Image (cartoon, coloured by chain):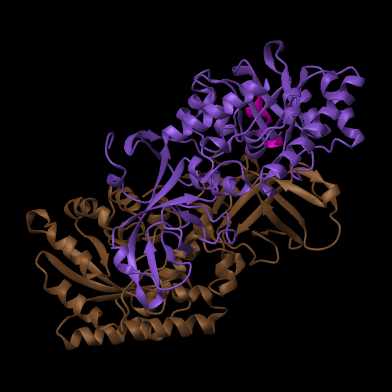
Chain colours: A purple, B brown
Amino acid sequence: MEGGALWTLCSPALLVDADKVKRNAQRMKDRCLELGVQLRPHMKTHKTLEGADIMTGGSRRCIVVSTLAEACFYGDRGFDDILYAYSLPFDKVERCAALSERLDLFQVLVDHPEALERLTKRRLRDGRRWHVWLKLDCSNGRAGVLPSDPGAVKLAQAIAEAEGVELTGVYAHCGNTYNCKGVEQIQAVAQETTESTLQFMEKLKAVGITCKSSIGSTPSCSHPVKDMSRLSEVHPGNYVFYDVQQSLIGSCSLEDVAVRVLTRVIGHCPHRNQLLVDCGWCGLSLDGAGKLRTGYAVIEGHPDLKLVSMTQEHGRVEPVSGALDFSSYPLGTPLMLIPYHACATAMMHPVYHVHSAGRLLGQWTPTRGW
Amino acid sequence: MEGGALWTLCSPALLVDADKVKRNAQRMKDRCLELGVQLRPHMKTHKTLEGADIMTGGSRRCIVVSTLAEACFYGDRGFDDILYAYSLPFDKVERCAALSERLDLFQVLVDHPEALERLTKRRLRDGRRWHVWLKLDCSNGRAGVLPSDPGAVKLAQAIAEAEGVELTGVYAHCGNTYNCKGVEQIQAVAQETTESTLQFMEKLKAVGITCKSSIGSTPSCSHPVKDMSRLSEVHPGNYVFYDVQQSLIGSCSLEDVAVRVLTRVIGHCPHRNQLLVDCGWCGLSLDGAGKLRTGYAVIEGHPDLKLVSMTQEHGRVEPVSGALDFSSYPLGTPLMLIPYHACATAMMHPVYHVHSAGRLLGQWTPTRGW
């Protein structure tokens, strides 16, 4: 298929625009360079070797992963300085230990004293130490200890003092930027998360602890606030692809979105004023239901079409309003779906078809599972 | 892991109860035997070799698939008499031709004169003929030609008369049984679909055409009506696993559901009255949003817990009402999620962990893609 036109692909197929990926990655690098913070890109959106090489500029160092499957995948391919940014799951301590003993710098996340206990119970070989980030919940509302909780500083101290363990940093995910609309709101959350994190770093300093700090999310890192330069690192991930959701939040323009799902018209249903397309929820995530005027995706170049529903391998498309002109959509017509959420849609595809200037360059194969 | 306890698995993990799978498969076989119709099980729910062997009783003959990836997967493993039950996609005619020339009996679905044209243009080698089922839409509202459409009989005639093509049968999917509640409603739809199909067969007979007939869906085949015995075949699929949705429709009891997603408690958030679990929308489908009192799944043995939201690798669990007793759910506590829709959740897992009487038997590896 290499060198072929996109239309030679069978559908549904996940398409990745290599030029946009590179541009998105470069912009984030430039932004971080300008801020003076270390970029530690998150791999969860694409989970591929090629995407990671672009995001790290080929250094194969300093990444974040969401699963141990990703950690092993990258570790096996020469990557190091890997942060497994997931509150230490007790069923995976032994696998984390193996990675810590195999890599130069494998790092875990802790947000509970019990997790620290698990680490101290499993001493690493050869005098190695566990590299631990303390996870803070700065109004994100998912994992992490609240910075206002007196237990937070105590836990940091316990990590710093525990034998065989090192407090590497403090980590906060500002996922609450996903509720924002526009740069102003994004920057307000970025500022709030940065301040909470920096205030917490001051509290640590007051008890004699210094370590790194990192916050992240694609919206906040796409529109960073000045104070973020006082952090050690940032860790966005989705920006490599972006998606409709990010364009609505205000992280990017729709032009920046690097992924599409290629689908084709496979049915005409004039009695229902509908087209059928060959993409269902096996090829496009259900995430974003009810959030778009155009249904489960934006159909590129057809702003008046709506992907109203999906079953396993079928999508139903109808006009946002009015009667459909079926002659404009002969059977076999290719359509490009811009996904609402790139992370959720990419994870459904066993392979990504990468292109540049309308020509296929090859395939990227993501890792899967946990 | 073989012989190990379920709790030795890392989570999230898709668990398949082999005993329930075999029982569900046997019941469907018995039902079809009693009715006197040929069972042609659909593979789309599990997409594995082992599941197919159980559903076909080891014959490796007479199956339905939803993708060409499945058709190739099964064709490569000695299966034959495969029906690709998907309105012929024009981008895949050549791949269908290759399968038709390789297998004894590869069958395709047609619901439009243009699709027939594509087939007649691509003559098969060695005097082979395309085996074609005509797809009817008997009030299902997805693909297929309406039986009331005068074009339907004409298309059947055109298929029957075209050179290099054979009209094998008439195929209808009664997916509208998914809107039913209870056996009575299911059987009303089953009766309506059966009657529409049989009436259409009469119309064909009147113009000198005889061929097979097939209807299917897990609800209708779990509670068949007598008249279904006048059909040649039925083609349900989900029944091998069943799920919460099927139990609500009335196809099965919750006891019959053969799949679970194993997850674990990874966080306590007393300030939000929530637990965090290690299953997000990478491990459990978003399908069924808003349909259950208990959120995105039923949590086995904990009817008062609700999976209220998911992100990529996190689930938020809270009580349906009242305050959560965190001491009942220590960090690391395993929980079993019964999926709303087994097809949609199974497709997210690169491997299924199969067990019997609480002991792991091994893994099934599904095929993916298109």
Would you place residue A7 above or below residue B232 in this image?
above
In the figure, residue A253 lies in which quadrant? top right
Q: Does the magenta stretch include residue A95?
A: yes
In the figure, residue B53 lies in which quadrant? bottom left
Q: Can residue B265 be seen in this snapshot?
A: no
| Image quarter of the N terminus of chain A | top left
Which segment is the magenta one?
A: A88-98
| Image quarter of the C terminus of chain A | top right
In percent of the image, x 41 and y 62: which residue is there? A314
How far across and down, in percent of the image, does residue A241 sit?
A: 51, 39
Q: Nearer the viewer, residue B209 or A233?
A: A233
Q: Is the magenta stretch mostly helix, strand or loop?
A: helix
Q: Can residue A207 be seen in this snapshot?
A: yes
Q: Nearer the viewer, residue A259 or B190?
A: A259
Would you place residue B94 above or below residue A45 in this image?
below
- Residue most extreme to the top: A126
Q: Is residue A81 magenta?
A: no
B10 vs A139, left or right, is left
How far across and down, in percent of the image, does residue A34 sit?
A: 64, 22
Q: Which of A316 and B215 is in front in this view?
A: A316
Would you place residue A344 above or below residue B171 in this image?
above
How far across and down, in percent of the image, does residue B249 sit?
A: 56, 74
- Residue most extreme to the front: A184
B116 vs A115, left or right, is left
In percent of the image, x 84 and y 55: which residue is there? B324
How far across and down, in percent of the image, does residue A22 sit?
A: 47, 29
Q: Nearer the viewer, residue A129 or B34?
A: A129
Would you place residue B2 above or below residue B174 in this image?
above
In the figure, residue B320 lies in which quadrant? bottom right
